[in-house]
Image (cartoon, rainbow, N blue to C red):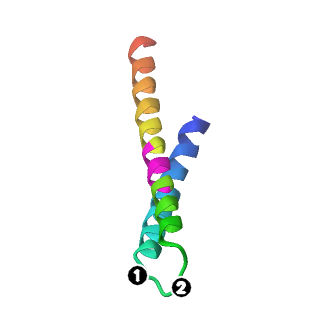
Amino acid sequence: MARARRSAAAVPFFLLGTIVLTLLATNALPVPSADRAFYSGLAVLCAVSTAVAVIDLVAIRRRMTEERRWHR
């Protein structure tokens, strides 16, 4: 159950990181100019982390459903 809470907490964090870093990569936010590839790389890393956390939540949910189904 702790793993599910960790993944559930990570999803919005990484999603927000993806959005902010994408905006930084497109120069939509007023910050000092930095390397666009750096922000793009971090945005991709956050997006992949979001996907992994969502897949983990789906796997945990499926496993819990199977356990309830077979252990009744």
**As drawn, 33 above or below 42:** below
Was residue 66 drawn as part of the magenta stretch in this picture?
Answer: no
Q: Position of residue 57 (x, y in %)?
A: 45, 38
Asked whether, in this view, residue 17 is left or right of residue 2, the answer is left
Q: Residues within 10 Å of mark 2 (few under 14, many from 20)?
A: few
Q: Residues within 10 Å of mark 1 (few under 14, many from 20)?
A: few
Q: Nearer the viewer, residue 22 or 13?
A: 22
Q: Position of residue 29 (x, y in %)?
A: 46, 83
Q: Quadrant of residue 2?
A: top right
Q: CA distance from mark 2 to mark 1?
A: 9 Å
Q: Quadrant of residue 61?
A: top left
Question: How many numbered marks are there?
Answer: 2
Which residues make up the magenta segment? 46-51
Q: Quadrant of residue 32?
A: bottom right
Q: Are marks 2 and 1 in contact (CB under 8 Å)?
A: no
The residue to which callout 2 is attached is 31
The residue to which callout 1 is attached is 28
**As drawn, 2 above or below 19:** above
Q: What residue is shown at x 48% (from left), y 52% (from top)?
A: 11
Q: Position of residue 6 (x, y in %)?
A: 58, 45
- Prevailing secondary structure of the magenta residues: helix
Q: What residue is shown at x 42% (from left), y 38% (from top)?
A: 55
Q: Quadrant of the C terminus?
A: top left
